[in-house]
Amino acid sequence: MEKRTINAADAPAPAGTYSQAIEVRNATRTLYVSGQIPVAVDGTVPTAFADQARVAWQNVVAQLHAAGMTLDDLVKVTIFLSDRRYIPEYRQVRSEFLGERRPALTCIITGIFDTAWLLEIEAVACA
């Protein structure tokens, strides 16, 4: 599989650590990860936003691993935040998980299904 980052010169540069577009060639598998919520395996939901973000990312990683994939295979991530005030904290936690990886990224401020959840993360991976 080949991935190519695209940041068109005649469009705005990404406002952060992501790619405007990702081209995938020769992939044999695509994984669509449903929105992963901040609920731990034991059913608990942390109260602090950063802890919820880590749990949601851990759940994304678990789905990737179950499919024989890793964070390196991510091509698109959509983050649903319950409030824009969480953006700085979210970026920090996202960086902990993604490091130098730059998938295409969308962040949406919206109501979340369960009021205890402060975010949800959905993803697409190719291998």
Image (cartoon, grey):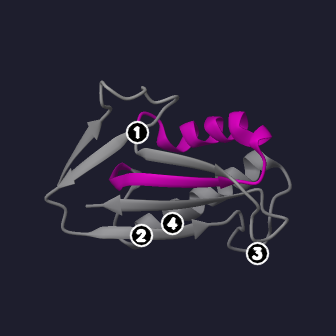
Label 3 crowd bin: few (<14), some (14–19), many (20+), radius 10 Å: few
Q: Calculate the distance from the C-alpha at mark 2 to the C-alpha at mark 3.
A: 23 Å
Q: Is residue 123 above or below residue 49?
A: below
Give the residue type at disc 3.
Answer: Gly
Point out residue 51 in the picture as x, y percentages from the top left corner: 75, 50
> Element type at marker 3?
loop
Residue labelled with disc 3: 43
Dot 2 or dot 4: first in sequence order is 2
Dot 1 or dot 3: first in sequence order is 3
Residue labelled with disc 1: 102
Give the residue type at disc 1.
Answer: Arg
Q: Which mark is residue 32?
A: 2
For the residue pair 36 and 58, the one nearer the viewer reads as 36
Point out residue 32 in the picture as x, y percentages from the top left corner: 41, 69
Q: Is residue 71 above or below residue 124?
A: above
Give the residue type at disc 4.
Answer: Ala
Q: Residue at x 45, y 30 (%)?
A: 14
Q: Which mark is residue 62?
A: 4
- Is the C-beta separation of discs 1 and 4 under 8 Å? no
Dot 1 or dot 4: first in sequence order is 4
Give the residue type at disc 2.
Answer: Tyr
For the residue pair 13 and 76, the one nearer the viewer reads as 13
Q: Is residue 114 magenta?
A: no
